[in-house]
Amino acid sequence: MKLSWIAALCITVVNISAAETVVLLEPFCSSSQHPAISTTLSNRPLEGARVDIYRKTDNGEKLSWTGSTDQQGLARPGEFEPGSYRVLAYSGKLFATLRLDVSNNGSGADACELKFVPPINAEQLRNEILETLARNAPSVQLKEFRGIVQDAGDAVIQRVKIEVLRKAALEKGNVAETLSNEKGQFALPLENGSYVAIFTYLGFKTRAVAFELGNQGWQGVRIAMTVGGSPSSPNAPPQEWNPER
């Protein structure tokens, strides 16, 4: 079997508020009049996947072939007329697609690959992100967890989401959560200990700050957030903030 230019499709399934979000990128493959559809899951042939192939027409799309993959993960639909097609493949909850252009060049079978990617465990993904943020976060000592959130021009940012996690147990989730108020200020009562605070706001880079809460340190902290397209680092050290001023 002659192997043509192979396009792979990655499907990411993330559980958010009990709903599945599927991100699709449609790849492209060119083939002779004898295409073969190769399906894989975790780099292994995927047997029994349903494959539907639609030909594009002036009035939309028309089903040209339907079948399933064999033990080698291959679907062999036979000879196709030159034209533009769309390939859809299903396996359980997974779905894959590619755009197929068939020409009368060549006589061998050309393989176009559909690569299924298993769903990502949303909780595991979140923990990995948190661990990366915590590892790179600047650290400060505070007497109280309170402060102010501002942008690069010192304007306050309202309704910034602030999540607090114990540094030694990120996987257990938030111990507290709040939003900055109309003055950009926030405060949460916490026991002494080591924490990581995550600051998120639409259009801005996520900030992470590690802090030790105890009898020593600042009365408050100033968090500067930068817009998503800014070249400045989102992990710039925070500054001391005096809530009495």
Image (spheres, helix red, strand yellow):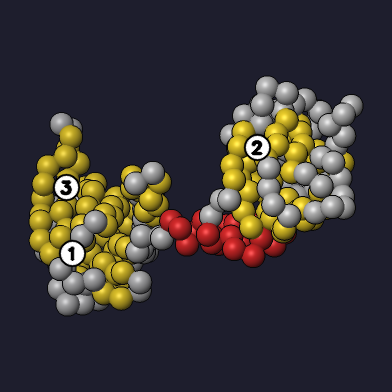
Q: What residue is at 49 percent from the left and 59 percent from the top? A: 125
Q: Dot 2, how many residues are within 10 Å of its Cα: few (below 14), some (14-19), or many (20+)? A: some
Q: Is residue 78 left or right of residue 154?
A: left
In depth, the one of 192 and 152 nearer the eye is: 192
Is tag 1's residue or tag 3's residue first in the polypeptide sequence? 1
Q: What percent of the width, then of the height, locates residue 107?
A: 20, 68
The residue type indicated by label 3 comes to: Tyr
Task: Report helix, strand or loop for mark 1.
Answer: loop
Mark 2 touches mark 3? (CB < 8 Å) = no
- The answer to whether residue 231 is left or right of residue 2 is right
Q: Which residue is mark 2?
A: 204
Nearer the N terminus, badge 2 or badge 3?
Answer: 3
Q: Amino acid type of disc 1? A: Ala
Q: Please report the residue visible at 81 percent of the width from the left and 48 percent of the height from the top.
A: 142
Instruction: Point out the frontmost of discs 2 and 3.
Output: 2
Residue 49 marker = 1
Depth check, mark 1 against mark 2: the one in front is: 2
What is the number of the mark on residue 54? 3
Res. 55 visible in picture? yes
Q: CA distance from mark 1 to mark 2?
A: 41 Å
The quadrant of the picture occupied by the N terminus is bottom left
Mark 2 element type: loop
Position of 157 with respect to 35 (left or right) is right
- Where the C terminus falls, by quadrant? top right
